[in-house]
Amino acid sequence: SDPYPPADPYTPATRGGDSSISAHGSPPSSAASASASASSSRPAASAEDAAAGGGSSPSSSFMNSILLAACSEDEVLPTNPDFPADLFTSCLTTPIKTALHWFAPRSLIQGITFDMIDRIPGVLNDRKTPLGELNWVFTAITDTIAWNVFQRDLFKKLFRQDLLVASLFRNFLLAERIMWTANCTPVTEPKLPPTHDHPLWQAWDYTVEHCLAQLPAMLAAEDAAIARSKQSDATAQGGIYSDGSGYPPPSPGGLMDPTDFQYAHNPFFEDHMTAFEVWLSLGPQQKKVPEQLPIVMQVLLSQSHRLRALKLLASFLQTGPWAVDVALSMGIFPYVLKLLQSPTLELRQELIFIWGKILALDKSCEADIVKENGHSYFINFLASQGGGAVYLAMAAFTVSKIIFSIPEKCIDAGIIPACSGKLDHEEALVRLWVCLCLSRLAECSLAGSFEIIREPSALANILILAQSDDCSEVRASAISILGSLLFHFMSTMNEEQKVMESAMGSVPGSFDPQSLGDQVYYSPSFRDHKMKETQAAKPVGAQLPPKDNMLIISSMNSISKALSAIFDSDSSPLVRREIAIAFSRLADGYPQEFVGMLTLDDTSSLSKDAKNQKELLLMFWNQLVQLSEDPHPVISAIAFEATNNIWNVVSGGSSQQVPIAQLNKRITELNGNSNLVRGASVPKALNQKNPRELSIPSFIMYITESNGDPRAFSFDTLSDAFRNLNGRNLQSPSASVQSSMSVSAYKPMDFQSLYDWCCSHILDLYCELTEDQSKEEEARSKNPFLRMNCGHNMFYPPEENDKEISSIREVASNNISSGELWSLSFIPKKPQIAVGDSLGNVGIWNFQTWEQDASFTIPTTDSEPPGVTSIHIIDSHVDTPLVAAGAGGTVALWRRADKKCKNNSILNVWQTSGSYGGYTNTSEGHGFTMSYNAENNYLVTGGCERGLVKIWDLSSEMCVWHGDVLRKGCVVTALEDVKRPMTNTYAVGSTDGAIVLVDARVPSSDENAHGGGVLSFEEHSSAIVSVGRQMSVGEEEKLVSASLAGDIRIWDLRFPSNGSLQVIQAHRSEITAITVSEKLPMIASGSSNGSIKLFGSAGRLLKVIQYHEGFLGTRMAPVTSLAIHPESKILAAGCADSVISLYH
């Protein structure tokens, strides 16, 4: 009879339900024939049976099942008496024993019998024993082979979804190898890739041989211990291993003396971790997955090597998102989830870093942390002393991801004091993420908002960060906390709500607060339960004790004053956007209160608290209106959406029902009674005939192309679209395409939030950085461009220089604009020049070919944009430097397209003249002016607020100094950075002819009319046109100034009391432009009568230019701008007729 009876593969498939695994040790011919006959004859009947029984058919079950057979159809099973009768089944059920029996006869080690193999000490599930170590290595090797050979989905299905299935297929890989040596090819259905010849099997052979080499001595020591045990009739103590552990021997008797034998553990895992470390040190090659990854995962099970394995995994995950994806598909999640219960302190940093990387890529893992109460692990680390900055940030990030699900548990676990204690951390990365964590808590939990202000010093530290932190992202995240606090605290003013709501009866038209719907701004994660939170927030005020009500009112006043101060001193678009979002949430979440404030005539019945609320609401409304005129289009759109919603309610949908003049008068009266507000209160768009929102969708497509940075926005044809926000028809080429977009399709909240943007950079974080990397990362996080330091050390002999200046001639000229050329600046290292005209346009021109490489217009909502009066090149040492252009008090930082940035974009645009209502009348002054300090990365601005000078730190994106430095009534006309003999000092020109040196190290004071002014030169009799500095061979810096009267004066700052060193009567007509070379003793001045004069060393007049070169030699138009190339002897002159000339 057949010793291997045929097996029906349908039987296990049917009994196993929808899926099953069947292993057959019978001859493949029998199994194959049974399978073929069953698959062809039973489907119809099986389908009927399944329909009757309500289950799945055998045919479908068979398709979802896996068949394992010992060999192929034309092969014969082995009959070696040294092996089990069913070798294939033995490999599947007892793999370690079978592998040892198979390897022993093939080993070079002699004298190993099967009886000795059966006596190997230990148990399979104890990795410290020889037998357990073999099983551990076997698991790691088979997992690694499958990982490197099988497809990802197949590996996950067979090795990660079920422990029993994984164990079976690990054993099958061994069976395939052993059966191949017996000339049998195991068969699977569906077919699996062959693994019998994988190189890692050699590592398994070495592991087995390492164990067998010690087996004789091991057993001899055991036998000796048993003999001594019988003689002494006592139980032996200790064990055979170096760590002193003992194992029950297979034969009767006690344990062995540890001095008899010292077992040498296999170095398999140490060797492969070293190989993995070498792979990491060489860097991932084309994102190729290291084959040792599953082995490193297995090492996490060992306490002795766990820390090293975690460090290696953390280093691997920081190579990029692809590495995190690989680790997740490999099955890292169960390992690190179990480690959250480990009390070992040494593992916390690496484990938290790994968890941060996982949650940044896979949100589905958040639920498992919540289920296992893993939040306390991260909060405890955040509250502990010490810890690297990256790991603390990762802990705060992890909590912020799960805090929406369990805010109460996080509060109970101490998240607020833990974050509050890190608000003053020295690293900006830590401050950023603890602020974002608190922001998420305040956004989703009303109780969390109250606990934040109850926490000692928490609110005070948040206010400090919001106003003065060097990192703009930290300031923005702190403001997001304040915005959520304001939103919740508004619900405590019940009495004021009733008074305001009583005024709604006089408002034209009906109003339903729910009608705003999705126009209310919330982050995407908050939108799902925004109405529930709003409704829950309304009645809380009456439930709070008086002490808490007082605390809330005090907190609101502090927050309001802080936001008002930030409003005028912060140039960061991130910060201004968060302020716009905060005020928009208030206006959209509490529309009745705002409408009541705007429409309530009789305020005599209001209590003191009600009047306080009115002042707060008025301040919020005024700043929201001013933000709707912000030059940054995203900020303007967010603010305008909220003001437009309130206006629609006030006007009943028509501007004629509530006249603009009446509303202006009422708001003016309200402003007169409040010390908290200033500036315009009615959006300019409300005075337009056409609603402004009709043109908002027209520029959305341009704005969203911002290369992932919320600071930046694409400006290709944006300026025209943005100018049409006032209600005029769009003129951009794509207007016809955009006109079909509905207003309701656009929502400002669709832009990426600050939190989501910061989360996207978590995958870019590295483990604890070196000192150099830390400094570079901090500089990068503070600003979209790095700090720079420029210096000039090249000087030429005066005689040679004068000779070259006298021989200068016009080499090129071109008409490049439709307006007057008001400002020029050469771009170093390239034959390019930046040109600003009177129409507000900036162009980059190649002066060799006269082709325009790029252009943009400074965004402004004014119907008549001011001209570009000042241009500076920022970060001049890089291939694609930034361009800073100023017009009418608005400054734009422009980045051209390069390898890293595909689109031209504006990195930042902000209004330097305070609350968007500064002095801009150029008839009394000379317009907006600015100077750039490369050493400190400062931008100094003035000219739009009379004598007020402001210094902006481009790295931190905030105003670091301001002061009114001129006499009353005078206007700033010129600015220049002075390097020597005093640092951080600036020369300021005035309309009365005075030149004031301002020391920015002196604290500014609004009460001091000359705050910061340390010296004053008053020899000029008319307004200063320009101020420049000139270096001599001895590095003595001289100051050069020119006035409208036509005189040029040179000053030695080391001896200010001596007066001017030299006076040059340059022109009889008004001087309109002047430029000074920092390297050369060269001064060029232009006048209103169309002449340019060049002065050399000692102020000698070397050349006069009045005509263009050429056959006809036409007369020059009035000169409006001049510039000297910083690295070449090239002079550029711009004229009122749009002609630019180059002289060399």
Image: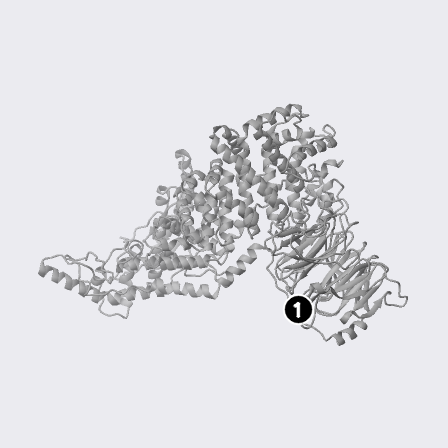
Position of residue 236 in the picture relative to residue 450 (left or right):
left
Q: In percent of the image, x 62 and y 48: which residue is there?
A: 569
> Looking at the picture, how far across and down is residue 7, in whole percent?
33, 49
Q: Which quadrant of the structure image shows residue 490?
A: top right
In depth, the one of 927 and 355 nearer the eye is 927
> Looking at the picture, how far across and down is residue 386, in whole percent?
41, 54
Q: Which quadrant of the structure image shows residue 232?
A: bottom left
The local crowd at label 1, few if under 14, some if 14 to 19, many if 20 or more residues have their Cα within 10 Å, is few
Looking at the image, how many numbered discs can be counted on the residues?
A: 1
Q: Secondary structure at mark 1?
A: loop
Question: On screen, 497 above or below 758?
Answer: above
Position of residue 250 in the picture relative to residue 310 (left or right):
left
> Residue beneath label 1, please?
792
Question: On screen, 68 above or below 604?
Answer: below
Decide if residue 72 is in sight here: no
- The amino acid marked with disc number 1 is His
Q: In percent of the image, x 55 and y 37: which residue is there?
A: 556
> Looking at the picture, how far across and down is residue 563, in whole percent?
59, 42
